[in-house]
Amino acid sequence: MTGPLEEELKTYEENKQDLVKKANGKYVLIKGKTVVDIFESEKDAIKIGIEKFGNVPFLVKKIEEIEQKQNYTSNLIKVG
């Protein structure tokens, strides 16, 4: 069983060196095996991802040589 963004994360890792060289600190939009585009802000990348693909999984990731660990929470989880 694979995770929802496994293919996109693999695509990022395969292209990471080139992305860091040309766009370190920016944000990349990846869908499947395709690097769609690079953006100045995470917000812009998400906006274009939704416009192009709709409400389906796609990856928006900050391009960094050394990655910072990030944790996210969702307000969609019901408790009780």
Image (tube, grey):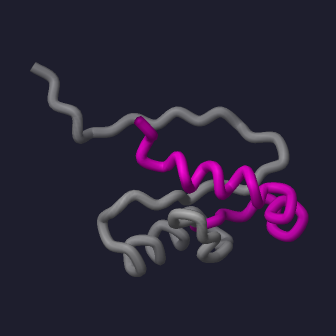
Figure quadrant of residue 40:
bottom right
Q: Residue furthest left?
A: 80
Along the viewing direction, whichever of 57 and 14 lies nearer the viewer: 14
Which image quadrant: the C terminus? top left
Q: Is residue 70 toward the left or the right of residue 13 in the image?
A: left
The spot of residue 56 in percent (x, y) is 34, 62
The spot of residue 55 in percent (x, y) is 30, 65
Figure quadrant of residue 75:
top left
Give the magenta part as a residue range: 1-29
Figure quadrant of residue 60:
bottom right
Magenta: main secondary structure: helix
Q: Is residue 5 above or below residue 25?
A: above
Q: In percent of the image, x 74 and y 40: which residue is there?
A: 67
Q: Residue furthest top?
A: 80
Q: Is residue 77 above or below residue 13?
A: above
Q: Is residue 9 within the magenta segment?
A: yes
Q: Is residue 75 within the magenta segment?
A: no
